[in-house]
Amino acid sequence: MFTIQNYSKQNIKNDILSGALVAVALVPEAIAFSFIAGVSPVVGLYGAFIIGLITSILGGKPGMISGATGSVAVVFVSLGLSVKHLYPDLGGEALSMMVLHTILLTSIMAGIIQVMIGMMKMGKFIRLVPQPALFGFVNGLAIVIALAQLPFLAPEHMGRYTSWIEIVEASITENSVMYVIIVATMATMQFLPKISKAVPAGLVAIIIATLGVYFGHIDTKTVGDLADLSQVRLPHFVLSDMSLFSWEMLRIILPSAVIVALVGLIESLLTLSVLDEMGGKRGSGNRECIALGIGNTASGLFGGMAGCAMIGQSVINFTSGGLGRLSSFTAAILLITLVVSFSGVIAAIPVAVLVGIMFMVSIGTFEFSSLKRIKHMPKSDVFVLVVVTIITVYYDLAVAVIAGVVISALVFAWEHAKIFSHTTEEEGKKIYALDGPLFFGSVTSFSEQFDVAHDPDIVVIDFKKARVMDSSGVEAIDALTQKYKKTGKKLTLRHLSEDCKRTLKVAGPFCAYEEDDPTYKVVRDY
């Protein structure tokens, strides 16, 4: 919660100014992400306000900005396509309302899932995502965001064209003005910050493009052409259509809700990690999971789409001096104020300038440094990066990251599935000095180290440089001990941890208790 007594005047000033800067920058992004999801800009703006407000108060990191994001919006694209496939006879306003209610219900369910994950304290598992998977995630997300802009540039009557060349030519002919605005927007966002950072470059581009189109009477698509913003009011409670809870619809909503929940948590916890590295008090991942879940649930109940933390806006806020909760709170309050009071101005914004902004967001999201690192990466890491990128583009973000984690874990297990031994003989006994981890992947290699039939009557197995990682390793020790026991040979096991000794069933009596026995714990299956 807010701790006003700990705020100095300088803190308050920095947080308010930084929050105001972020609020202005949030407006075009929320609108653009709404277009990606295929819903009215109001849905994205409401989501940005509600999620931003709740996470500013309850979130795990003061100053972190949350709202409608591209990573969650692209999940809603496939959700909308599934709804259209399920109801092929619907069209126009009826189909739009069906898609909207489905997105709201998905947002509510995703929020509930996120709260449950936070309450089970599973936020720490973000540390299991390997760096190549993160590179693939952000690169795939960048590509998806860029591809989502192409429908705005498509020519009318697409069906009359038979080749991509004809489509491109028609698009250039029909949307020449849009291309000019897009290029001008991208140039403004690229070069203006090098001159001055006093005002967000995206805001400058929006103002210039809107004024030019309005006073120049230029014929081009505007936000008002895509959605009516004249009736925008403060968010109010929206009871979603409960008739959607058919088995067929639930089969669409539930998987999408899981994906939205996982994607939102992954991006939020990654953002929290980035801010932690930049300095300040360490944030709470589990608290952020719960806050985001409450925010997404409330957003769906009040007509907004689900979202998550925004890496770019959070970094902007942090570097601009917005280190406290007052900064993100100010951003949320000012955002809804702008939307409610100046909806007519927002409706006049050209769509092309938003497309240009999203292209720049895509470029900024893509991790170009990963391309330079590929030649220095192990082949397994390159494989993970490429696979995660491809799955992100052609399937979805959550599955891509999970696939990256699974592949990396399998590669790690394969590369460490070897345990080595160095043997010495002294005074009629043979000593096996083991080196390496003993776990499910290396038990075969472990068993192959020993020659039970030809070993002398006294055998010593030294685990000083080895470590028993799981119950499979314990079972392998018991099985080997049983083999030596059947041949009547004396076996001694050295340097096993107390935890390992207690777990052993057959080999326990053969353990030697040394002063320098290790203290590691063995992972057991229950």
Image (cartoon, rainbow, N blue to C red):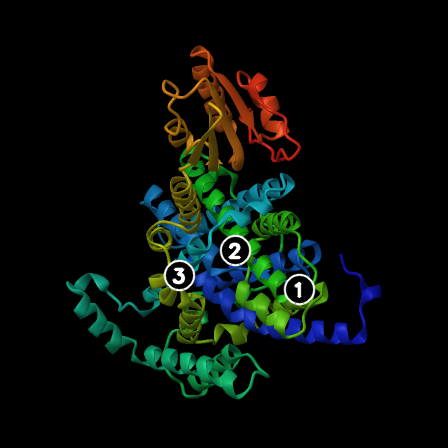
**Is residue 22 placed above or below 421 in the rendered structure?**
below
| Residue type, mark 3 in image | Asn
Q: Residue at x 82, y 65 (%)?
A: 6
Q: Earlier in the sequence, mark 1 or mark 2?
A: 1
Label 2 Cα neighbours within 10 Å, binned few <14 / some 14-19 / many ≥20 = many
- Residue 203: give x, y in percent of width and height: 53, 78
Q: Secondary structure at mark 1?
A: loop
- Residue 252: give x, y in percent of width and height: 41, 40
Q: Residue at x 62, y 28 (%)?
A: 499
Q: Is residue 341 visible?
A: no
Q: Which mark is residue 139?
A: 3
| Quarter assignment of residue 55 | bottom right
User: Along the line of sight, which residue is nearer the eye, 422 or 141?
Assistant: 422
Q: Which mark is residue 266?
A: none
Q: Earlier in the sequence, mark 3 or mark 1?
A: 1
**Is residue 281 placed above or below 347 in the rendered structure?**
above
User: Along the line of sight, which residue is nearer the eye, 422 or 67?
Assistant: 422
User: Along the line of sight, which residue is nearer the eye, 227 or 330?
Assistant: 330
Q: Earlier in the sequence, mark 3 or mark 2?
A: 3
Q: Residue at x 41, y 79 (%)?
A: 186
Contact (CB < 8 A) between labels 3 and 1?
Answer: no
| Residue type, mark 2 in image | Glu
- Which quadrant of the figure contains the C terminus? top right
Label 1 Cα neighbours within 10 Å, binned few <14 / some 14-19 / many ≥20 = many
**Is residue 455 placed above or below 332 in the rendered structure?**
above
Residue pointed to by mark 2: 267
Residue pointed to by mark 1: 63
- Which quadrant of the figure contains the N terminus? bottom right
